[in-house]
Image (tube, rainbow, N blue to C red):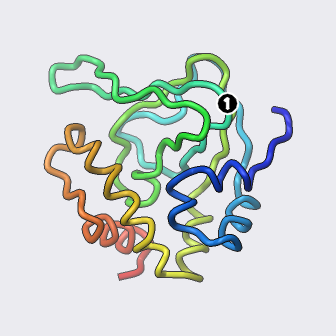
Amino acid sequence: MEAFNTRGILARVPLFAESLDSRQLDYLATQCKPVVYPNGAVVMAEGDFGDAMYVIVDGTVRVTFQDRHGGEQRVAQLGAGDVVGEMSLLTGMRRTATATTKGEVAALEIGKVTFEEMFARRPELIDRFSAVLAGRQAELDRIAAGADASAEAIGARIRRFFGRL
C-alpha cells in the first residue's frame, strides 16, 4: 500500500470529525494499522464480535446480511472515506452484517484498545460518539430489529462495554 496521510483521511470521516479535536485526531492517526485485503476477502462476518473497525482508504466493500429466510440482503456498498464495523466495536454488540471486498481494498484498522485508552482519558468522548452513532443505528434498525437508536441508549452500551458506567 502506498503511503497516505492517515490523519487527513481520519479528519474527513464524519464519526471522527464530529467527535474528536485536533489532538485526539493526531493520537488516533498514530494508532491506525494500514491493512490490504484481496478481492473477495471477508473483512468482518455477521454474528462475530467486533475487535476492530475499518476506514476504507481505497477500494469497495459490499455489506450484506442474512434475512430471516436465509437470503442475502445488500445493506450498502462502501468506498473511500467510509467506515465499517464501528457499531460492534464501540458497543460490544455482535456484527449485524458481513463486509466483503470487491477488488483489492486498502483500509485503516482501529482496534478496541485505542478507544479504551481514549475513553479512559476523555470519558466525555462517549457522549460525542453516541450522538454520531445514533444516526447510524437508526439506519440499521431494520437489521437489528427493535434496537434502541437513541444517543442515550448507544452511550449506555458504550459505557457498559468499556466499563464506564
Indicate the quadrant where residue 149 lies: bottom left
Lateral position of residue 11 relative to residue 88, left or right: right
Q: Position of residue 137 (x, y in %)?
A: 30, 51
Quadrant of the image containing the C terminus = bottom left
The residue nearer to you, when weighing 25 against 107, is: 25
Residue for point 62% across, 53% down: 110
Mark 1 neighbour class, 10 Å CA radius: few under 14, some 14 to 19, many 20 or more? some
The residue at which mark 1 appears reads as: 58
Element on which disc 1 rests? strand
The residue nearer to you, when weighing 19 against 30, is: 19
**Residue 90 position (above or below residue 161):** above
Residue for point 70% across, 53% down: 32
Q: Position of residue 92 (x, y in %)?
A: 38, 58
Quadrant of the image containing the N terminus = top right
Lateral position of residue 136 relative to residue 89, left or right: left
The mark tally for this picture is: 1
Q: Position of residue 9 (x, y in %)?
A: 68, 48
Residue for point 41% across, 77% down: 163
Residue for point 72% across, 58% down: 29
Q: Position of residue 23 (x, y in %)?
A: 70, 73
Lateral position of residue 124 relative to residue 57, left or right: left
Indicate the quadrant where residue 131 lies: bottom left
**Residue 99 position (above or below residue 146):** above
**Residue 94 position (above or below residue 160):** above
Name the amino acid type tagged 1: Asp
Lateral position of residue 155 relative to residue 121, left or right: left
